[in-house]
Image (tube, rainbow, N blue to C red):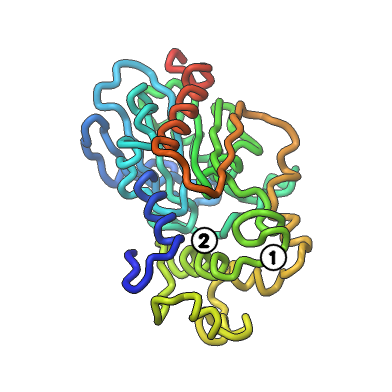
Amino acid sequence: MTPTRREPFLAALVVSLLALTSAVPLLQNTQVANPFVVRDVMIPMRDGVRLHTKIFTPAGQAGPLPIIMKRTPYGVEGSDGNFVSYLKALADEGYIFVFQDLRGKFGSEGTFVMQRAPRAPGNTAALDEGTDTYDTIEWLLKNVPRNNGRVGMLGISYDGWTTIMGALEPHPALKAISPQASPADMWLGDDFHHNGAFRLSYGFEYAAMMESGKDVQQFAFDRYDTFGWYLALGPLSNVNAKYLHGKIPTWNDFVAHPDYDEFWKRQTMIPQIRSVKVPTPASRKYRMPGPPGMGATRTSITSRFLTRRHFIARRG
């Protein structure tokens, strides 16, 4: 959605991410988009919910290839734009690519939960982004022709977080991940709080954007100067009283959990990372303008990690 009176940072962030970004399978559409054959499928999860997924297979595929997957809440339409810049080096190497809408977003069924907390160790009945990743990989191995049984995952920001979630209880076929600039603890030092200090504009706008519908929807401010809007807002209770009306779960969580309580301790991924189960490079984001080509450099590093070290090498 294009903002009419303002161009907030969140809009630019989402636009960039979108651009970069039953037992019998239901094939909704198959297209040829040189150099890929593209399939739209609905992949069933263990609870019966189906997730919308786009599969890009090289049109000239000569033998078994590994799969590279990205799972996102920002929508998978236009995923072929990734091959122009972000994933160009990997596309040139020759892979099967998979892009998936998270549960409850865009074309996927189910209910979206912002950064769904990882299930407790041993709780095999619970669902999280890790179980959805596991079930997706299992389906891909059985239903994507001529894959070599190896899968890699990557992503930036929220997509980096889903990548890490997929590696907490990884499918045996997940051979390498490259999470980039992933959040880790949203109260201590990430987007919504900085060491407990609440980031009002980011928290309000992002929660409204992600949870107002299945797509992403910018909040409709009534003026260009949003600084003035926040000054005029008054107490934070006015957010629900005047605008959100209790309909945005993440905002309600901000209100109910202002301190570092069990809610935030359960949501953080840090205690879940007890050992490295899948080969993973370290990547760090700095909040400053980078030199031209920085994105290409990061992608090149990722490409070398995923391919040169042969974690998901095409040789099978």
Nearer to us of marks 2 and 1 is 1
Return the residue at label 2: 111
Tell which residue pokes out farthest to the top in this image.
Answer: 315
Location of residue 147 in the rendering, given as x and y in whole percent from the top left corner = 41, 24
Measuring 51% from the left and 64% from the top, which residue is drawn there? 206
| Quadrant location of the N terminus in the rendered image | bottom left
Give the residue at x 57% y 47%: 129
Q: Is residue 279 above or below residue 4?
A: above
Residue 74 placement, left or right of 263: left
Q: Which residue is mark 1?
A: 197
Quarter occupied by residue 134: top right
**Residue 260, horizontal then vertical, whole percent:** 77, 62
Are dots 2 and 1 in contact, CB under 8 Å?
no
Whether residue 122 is visible: no
Secondary structure under the numbered disc 2 in the rendered image: loop
Q: Position of residue 93 (x, y in %)?
A: 36, 22
In space, the residues marked 2 and 1 are separated at their CA atoms by 29 Å
Q: Is residue 167 left or right of residue 292?
A: right
Q: Nearer the viewer, residue 255 or 233?
A: 233
Residue drawn at 45 percent across, 61 percent down = 9
What is the three-letter code of the residue carrying label 1?
Answer: Ala
Image quadrant in which you'd find residue 248 = bottom right
Q: Find numbered disc 1 in the image and state the secondary structure of the residue it sits on.
A: strand
Q: Would you place residue 105 above or below residue 6 in this image?
A: above
The amino acid type found where label 2 is placed reads Thr
